[in-house]
Amino acid sequence: MKEVVGVKFKEVGKIYYFDPKSIKYNSGDIVIVETARGVESGEIAMANRKISEESITHPLKPIIRKATDDDRETITENRRREQEAFRICEEKIAVHRLGMKLVNVEYTFDRNKILFYFTADGRVDFRALVKDLASVFRTRIELRQIGVRDEAKMLGGIGVCGRPFCCASYLGGFQPVSIKMAKEQGLSLNPSKLSGVCGRLMCCLKYEQDTYNELYKTTPKVGAIVSTPDGRGTVVEQNILTGVLKVVLDKSQSAVATTYKVKDVRIIKDGKIRIDKKEMDALKGLEDT
């Protein structure tokens, strides 16, 4: 077992382990640490605790120090410089006529590097822009292209549900979301109803998927052939949450369906969840991150 603390570098972001060197830290403490990007300031998101060695990515770097008053002034000054750097970079992008949208700017704590995050429809040749920025700021410059989901996470906003974006308020990272999830949950495959402000499938589709996966283990899908108390038939409609099925019996002389509970039928041959070509064409691109 190894004692560690968890540090985050964004309001809502991944937590990284560091060695506290037997010093006690509390959640919310601001600390100075060395990372792959350079010396950074971060916030203690997980106070001292012991975890297994297998959970640690080595080498485990130590906390340099708890932030002093001077360090806090440096952090505040860096935030001010980031705003100025954002303005200058936007001007340079316009001068170079580049098809890119600047999203965010970050200084490392020691100001040895400035990171510019941007979105673009394709690849952008920003070599001239980097040289231009380096001549202005006289430090290392890194331009990093991000996706629209990352943009939404950085900028934040209010979702269609009326609450702050999940990605910007508590989701540490993105999980895969698929059109199949929407189909399995019986949702209307309408792009305007399934996509978030970022233009991709809403992250909340993932929340209930584990429950649907479990229910589908015992619930016949539409098209399934089942045995009912009244004979064999085909499932034409289902409500997976209530466990109610509508079955057209083989012996029926009409297409009128009979209602059954899942517990009252037995699956002979299950159906498949299919997404037709028109639905796929309408939703094309929503899964991209």
Image (cartoon, grey):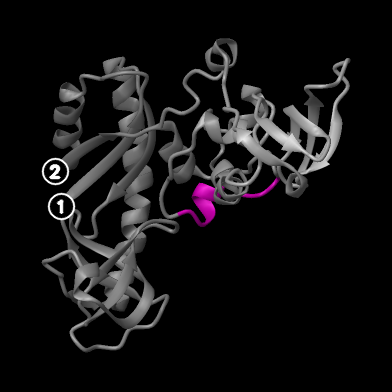
Residue 119 in the image, given as x and y percentages of width and height: 37, 28
Looking at the picture, tell me which residue is in the foreground, 40 or 78.
Answer: 40
Residue positioned 14% across, 43% down in the render: 140
Q: Is residue 6 left or right of residue 61?
A: right
Tag 2–tag 1 contact (CB < 8 Å): yes
Q: Is residue 163 left or right of residue 181?
A: right
Placement of 286 over or under 153, stated as above or below? above
Q: Amino acid at mark 2?
A: Arg
What's the residue type where badge 1 is placed? Answer: Asn
Within 10 Å of the Cα at label 2, are there few (<14), some (14-19), or many (20+) other Cα atoms? some
**Picture quadrant where residue 60 is located:** bottom left
Q: What is the crowding at mark 1: few (fewer than 14 residues within 10 Å), some, or many (at least 20)?
A: some
Q: Is residue 165 magenta?
A: yes
- Residue beneath the point at 24% across and 88% down: 23
Q: Earlier in the sequence, mark 2 or mark 1?
A: 1
Find the magenta span and give its range. Answer: 162-171
Identify which residue, 210 or 125, lies in the foreground: 210
100 is higher (above) or lower (below) than 205: above
Residue 235 horizontal/vertical position (percent):
73, 29
Element type where label 2 sits in the image? strand
Residue linked to disc 1:
112
Dot 1: element: loop
As drawn, which residue projects farthest toward the left? 59
Q: Is residue 41 above or below residue 173?
A: below
Specify whether residue 168 is painted magenta.
yes
Q: Does residue 170 appear left or right of residue 128 in this picture?
A: right
Task: Check residue 140 in the rendering and tell me which mark sits there, or answer none.
Answer: 2
Q: Is residue 257 left or right of residue 13?
A: right
